[in-house]
Image (spheres, helix red, strand yellow):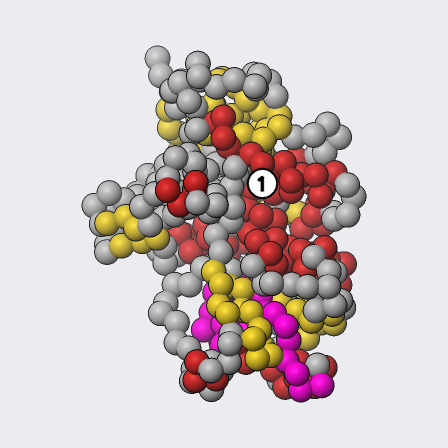
Amino acid sequence: MTAMMKAAIFVEPGRIELADKPIPDVGPNDALVRISTTTICGTDVHILKGEYPVARGLTVGHEPVGVIEKLGSAVSGYQEGQRVIAGAICPNFNSYAAQDGLPAQDGSYLVASGRCGCHGYKATAGWRFGNLIDGTQAEYLLVPDAQANLAPVPDGLTDEQVLMCPDIMSTGFKGAENANIRIGDTVVVFAQGPIGLCATAGARLLGASTIIGVDGNEHRLQIAKKMGADITLNYKQCDVVAEVMRLTGGRGADSAIEALGLQSTFEASLRVLKPGGTLSSLGVYSQDLTIPLGAFAAGLGDHRIVTALCPGGKERMRRLMNVVASGRLDLGLLVTHQFRLDDIVAAYDLFANQRDGVLKVAIKP
């Protein structure tokens, strides 16, 4: 008989449900990981709503913490029973882009309709879990190219402490890294959800001296202070652009990090920049963006707009877990709720509707 497991699958827009699926077979370059903890990402909510298309029946999720159950014959340097994580982005590092220093990129950038059962085209880059192949919201996960993607969890770190490393921490830190931050800079971070909070923490670690966190949720603004924000602005209570200009004496911010994926936050990020400032964009956008003439200084402002996808691979994960192990950052604060995998539908309902002060949920099979 085929061994089965429970998995959260995309059924149709508005429906992700728990189903039985076969436990994957392990190829020579793969590893089978028994999931101990995973979580729900804002991108998964885009999938749930049908804003980002995936194949029907696909297991969703891309943030794994677990234990190696079985190793492929060609995978060395690991052992069964070892605690590991893998990046949400799991490239094979054979593509031109990956070997050119972009570890989030893995060959073709777009997938045509038909391969994923969706309409038109969609960006893929190196994102495979819960996008092109079965993801992490299940009892077991097949990790491809395991030699490049598995990272051992240091002794003494809990699942909750490293749960942000595969995606949220890597993405948020990349936003800060792309923002061209120098010691003494002023940085504005738009949206203090989990990714924005990690971008705030990353800006602090990179040497920004004034970090301004923007959100409309007072609870998240309080967490932002713990993550490194010096000043918090509630966009419901003030004109954020005018306030940033006042705080900077009219100079504007050195950098702005956009961590939500809306036209309004993208445009505000442009408007707060100084001449020569950098807009680091992390949001996943579901509609076309417009660049306003004034905000862009008609193309004369020496502005830089940089996009990013969460870097993957074992070296990236090792570095992120080093930050956690050093005690410089406690991302366990972001895990506000826990659910069993059996209750995944309720977890999606809570997370998608942002109830009860939720930041991140820990899903435990």
Residue at position x 39%, y 24% in the image: 24
- Asked if residue 8 is positioned above or below residue 230 in the image, the reply reads above
Determine the image quadrant of residue 204. Answer: bottom right
Looking at the picture, does residue 287 appear above or below residue 322?
A: below
Q: Where is residue 325 in the image (x, y as percent from the top left)?
A: 74, 38
**Category of crowding for the residue at label 1, using alpha-carbon neighbours closer than 10 angstroms: few (below 14), some (14–19), many (at least 20):** many
Residue visible at 73% across and 27% down in the picture: 155
* x 56%, y 19%: residue: 77
The quadrant the C terminus occupies is: top right
Q: Going by the picture, which residue comes out furthest to the right?
A: 327
- Answer with the quarter of the image where residue 150 lies: top right
With 142 as the anchor, is 354 left or right in this view?
Answer: right
Q: Is residue 261 magenta?
A: yes
Residue 57: image x %, image y %? 33, 39
Q: Does the magenta stretch include residue 124?
A: no
Res. 30 visible in picture? yes
Asked whether, in this view, residue 59 is left or right of residue 36, the answer is: left
Q: In this picture, which residue range is highlighted in magenta?
A: 249-269
208, 357: nearer the viewer: 208
Frontmost residue, 364 versus 65: 65
Q: Where is residue 138 in the image (x, y as percent from the top left)?
A: 47, 33
Depicted 101 relative to depicted 295: above or below: above
Say which residue appears at 40% left-offset and 52% top-offset. Answer: 48
Residue 98, given in percent of the width and then of the height, sits at 43, 42
Residue type, mark 1 in image: Arg
Total labels drawn: 1
**Of residues 335 and 187, which is closer to you in this image?**
187
Q: What element carries label 1?
A: helix
* Quarter of the picture holding the N terminus: top left
Write down the residue under mark 1. 316
* Residue 358 visible in the current orientation: no
Q: To which quarter of the image does residue 364 belong?
A: top right
